[in-house]
Image (cartoon, rainbow, N blue to C red):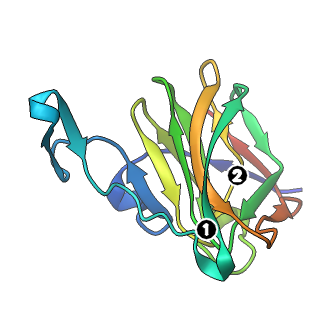
Amino acid sequence: MRRHVLRLEPLLAANFAPFGQVVEARLDGSHHGINDGYAERYHDLAQIDTATDGGRTLVNIFRAKPRALPLKLSLVERHRLGSQLFMPLSPQRFLVVVATAGLTPRPETLRCFLAGTGQGVNLARGTWHCPLLALDGGGDYLVIDRGGVADDCEVHRLEQAEIWIEA
């Protein structure tokens, strides 16, 4: 079986744009003072997409166990009816493995982004991705996704190659 190693890429809005949005409080983004100057609002950070086929927006907390590198990947999944947002609730890093929406991804189309502290992601509808890959001590993540009648999680096992993430 072929061995394919993903290299870690920094999570930057421009690099991640084909897969969704980076969610972070950036000084060069849209923001303004509120609450008589006691808070700063970083505005319109993600395009939450959940209304297709009668869906509704769910707000969840996922408690993730930490992963260690090197890490062998076993599956990717996608949600064809809505976006999915992951934001750590404490300063922690996590990995975001993605491939563009469409046909089942091949190993060479997978990309691995390292989300730094203070960064989250909103995965666009249909984007192939690995489940949450928390680093450091794991922890709690705010997850905003779609709820509704239809089951919207398509899983694909990565059996055509050994796919690894190394430090």
Residue at (89, 60) in percent of width and height: 159
Quarter containing the C terminus: top right
Could you say where residue 128 lies in the image, as x and y percent from the top left? 66, 65
* Circle 1: element type: loop
Q: Amino acid at mark 2?
A: Cys
Residue 18 versus residue 134 in the image, above or below: below
**Of 157 and 126, the residue lying toward us:** 126
* Circle 2: element type: loop
Q: Farthest residue in the front direction?
A: 36
The label on residue 68 is none
Q: Amino acid at mark 1?
A: Thr
The label on residue 127 is 1
Query: Image quadrant of residue 62?
Result: top right
Mark 2 sits on what residue? 130
Residue 81 versus residue 85 in the image, above or below: below
**From mark 2 to mark 1, how far is it between C-alphas?**
10 Å
Query: Image quadrant of residue 55?
Result: bottom right
Could you say where residue 28 lies in the image, as x and y percent from the top left? 15, 48
Residue 109 appears left or right of 28:
right
**Of 4 and 128, the residue lying toward us:** 128
Could you say where residue 63 lies in the image, as x and y percent from the top left? 69, 30
Quarter containing the N terminus: bottom right
